[in-house]
Image (spheres, rainbow, N blue to C red):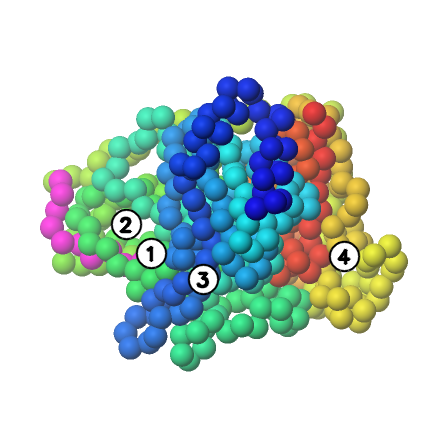
Amino acid sequence: MGISRRDFVGGLASLPVAGVGIRIANASSVEVLRAATGTARLVPGDYPATPIWGFNGKTPGPVIRVRQGERLVRRFVNKLPQPSTIHWHGIRIANAMDGVPELTQPLVPPDSTFEYDFRVPDAGTYWYHPHNRTWEQLARGLYGALVVEEKKPPVVDRDEVLLIDDWRLGNDARLEESFGAMMDWSHGGRLGNWITVNGHGDFRQTVQRHERLRLRLVNVANARIFPLSLTGLEGWIVALDGQPVTQPLPAGRMILAPAQRIDIVVDVVAPSGAEAALHFINGDDTLPIARFKVDGTVRKKKLPAPKPLPANPVPALGDLGKARKTVLRMEGGAMGGMRGAMMGGRMMGMRGLVGQGRVWAFNGLAEMPEKPLLSAALGETVWIEMINDTAWPHAMHLHGFHFRKIGKDKSQGPLRDTLLVDSEETVEIAFVADNPGKWLLHCHMVEHTAGGMATWIQVNA
Ligand code: C2O
Ligand code: CU
């Protein structure tokens, strides 16, 4: 309790006085999010339940729903045998609430608490997960959805979050506890052998023909990239990583990299008696991971095409010619050309790095730098050129901001917080540094994060 109490008080300094009174008055009625051990029936049939770690003892944890602009308060209670934190992925949040150990808050030790209290500026689909030993804690099942509802949500018949995970299970349905395996760390990360949607290996729902569904797809896996497709469902992509797209796009084949979200609005077009499904495209195979049995017809005709969702208050990019520019070179991993990198202030060869579990590097450094990758003035437009000089794709995630991919012709892509950068690809991104603090930039293949692919940027107040 000692540490959390100190942070609790320390965190008050930056809040308006009115908020302080409210928070203290309600201190005992704050909703709790408890990280604890539990079990889940990930595999149906005769298999035993799987021991997991989860928020409120479940995987996924509770779906948290709030309205855009509202305040979200949760007391995090750590009942795990390890220290932890909560990161609210994709929320343009106050820096002190971002959940990054060392950078924005101290670790929350076992049997301690930390109070998260922040406003959610943007509507959309977000999620929460720990940010300590994420390669183990996420793999054990610690995650949940955070849905921020539009002030006027679009009309749909049902609104469903689908958290897609990839577990590595043994024959007894237990987790294989090979979390630190260097083979995974130096390759594509920990890939599993059992896919679940909302913790179910056989996710099923019953729908009606011409029903309109909003499906919020979230990739909560450690490292797996999910190519996805639909059958019996037709519609549009309406948002990426929480942020509405300006023009809804047809929801055909979709790529969902770790931590990314895609919101789709789809109509059930399969006839009554048939089955609609969301599929994981696994090489030449398509594997239905969420099945929708069609029983009856809800209306004679499909609804007309939806309007685009209203944009969130994300500032437009400033003059790119005047942007603060920096380069981020990604190196290392198996089959890469990296010979060594800096660690602990000295140059280390690959063998030494492998011994430390640091097989990746950003700009030649295999650990979090003491100095930020760049330091920006408040409101400045920042431009980062990311060069993937490795044999692997990386899902690059920036905390605290949504950015746009800048094309060679200076075209601006959709707002995202996580972008897949292919092997040997160079990608340029830009965003407005309107949120002061220390913000992490890392690969969201969480074995890569721990293996050296993490840096941070400073935005001055
Ligand atoms: Cu979803 Cu730094 O994480
Ligand atoms: Cu990576």
Q: Which mark is residue 278?
A: 1
- Label 4 and label 1: CA atoms lie apart by 38 Å
Label 4 vs 1, first from the N-terminus: 1
Mark 2 vs mark 3: give the one in front. 3
- Label 2 and label 4: CA atoms lie apart by 45 Å
Q: Which mark is residue 366?
A: 4
Label 2 vs 3, first from the N-terminus: 3
In the figure, is residue 8 to the left or right of 294? right
Most extreme residue toward the bottom, as rendered? 171
Mark 4 vs mark 1: give the one in front. 4
Is label 1 in a helix, a strand or a loop?
strand
In the figure, is residue 327 to the left or right of 276? right
Q: State which region is magenta.
A: 284-299
Quarter of the image where one finds residue 99 = top right
Circles 2 and 4: CB atoms closer than 8 Å:
no
- Label 3 and label 4: CA atoms lie apart by 32 Å
Quarter of the image where one finds residue 429 = top right
In the depicted structure, whether residue 356 falls above or below residue 254: below
Q: Which mark is residue 233?
A: 2
Mark 3 residue crowding within 10 angstroms, few (<14) / some (14–19) / many (20+) = many
Q: Nearer the viewer, residue 409 or 96?
A: 96
In the figure, is residue 144 to the left or right of 296? right
Q: Which mark is residue 440?
A: none
Q: Amino acid at mark 1?
A: Leu
Report the residue at 76% width, 33% height from top.
375
Q: Nearer the viewer, residue 78 or 341?
A: 78
Q: Amino acid at mark 2?
A: Leu
Magenta run includes residue 293: yes
Q: Which residue is mark 3?
A: 37
Mark 1 vs mark 2: give the one in front. 1
Report the residue at 40% width, 70% height from top.
50
Label 1 vs 2, first from the N-terminus: 2
